[in-house]
Image (cartoon, rainbow, N blue to C red):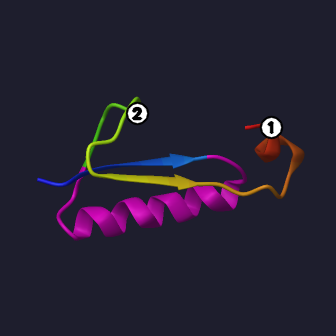
Amino acid sequence: MVTFTVTTLGCKANQYDSELIHGSLVALGYAPRDDRHGCDDVCVINTCAVTGESEAQ
């Protein structure tokens, strides 16, 4: 089974987008990985640099 992680850095809009990405991958039959310290097959890093806080992340 293909596993994935979605890491979100940045603004609140990115959190919503990451949830959509997560749901889409699950719908395709991918399995979310509980451990955020690695990624077996697919790693999504969703980020932006709109605010100073997101740039710091």
Which residue appears at 33% of the width and 41% of the height? Answer: 39
Considering only vertical position in the picture, is 38 above or below 50? Answer: above
Asked if residue 21 lies in the magenta stretch, the reply is yes
Q: Main structural element of the magenta stretch: helix, strand or loop?
A: helix
**Residue farthest toward the left in the current orientation of the protein:** 1
Residue 24, horizontal then vertical, whole percent: 34, 69
The residue range painted magenta reads 9-31
Residue pointed to by mark 1: 56
Q: Is residue 36 left or right of residue 12?
A: left
Q: Amino acid at mark 1?
A: Ala
Q: Secondary structure at mark 2?
A: loop
Q: Is residue 17 left or right of residue 29?
A: right
Q: Secondary structure at mark 1?
A: helix
Which residue appears at 80% of the width and 45% of the height? Answer: 55
Residue 6, horizontal then vertical, whole percent: 44, 50
Distance from label 2 to label 1 (Cα)? 20 Å
Residue 53, horizontal then vertical, whole percent: 82, 41
Considering only vertical position in the picture, is 7 above or below 36? Answer: below
To which quarter of the image does residue 27 belong? bottom left
Q: Earlier in the sequence, mark 2 or mark 1?
A: 2
Considering only vertical position in the picture, is 24 above or below 57? Answer: below
| Label 1 neighbour load within 10 Å: few <14, some 14-19, many 20+ | few
Residue 22, horizontal then vertical, whole percent: 38, 59
Q: Nearer the viewer, residue 19 or 50?
A: 50
Q: Amino acid at mark 2?
A: Arg
Which residue appears at 45% of the width and 66% of the height? Answer: 20
CB contact under 8 Å: marks 2 and 1: no
Q: Assign the C terminus to one quadrant of the image.
A: top right
**Residue farthest toward the right in the current orientation of the protein:** 52
Residue pointed to by mark 2: 36
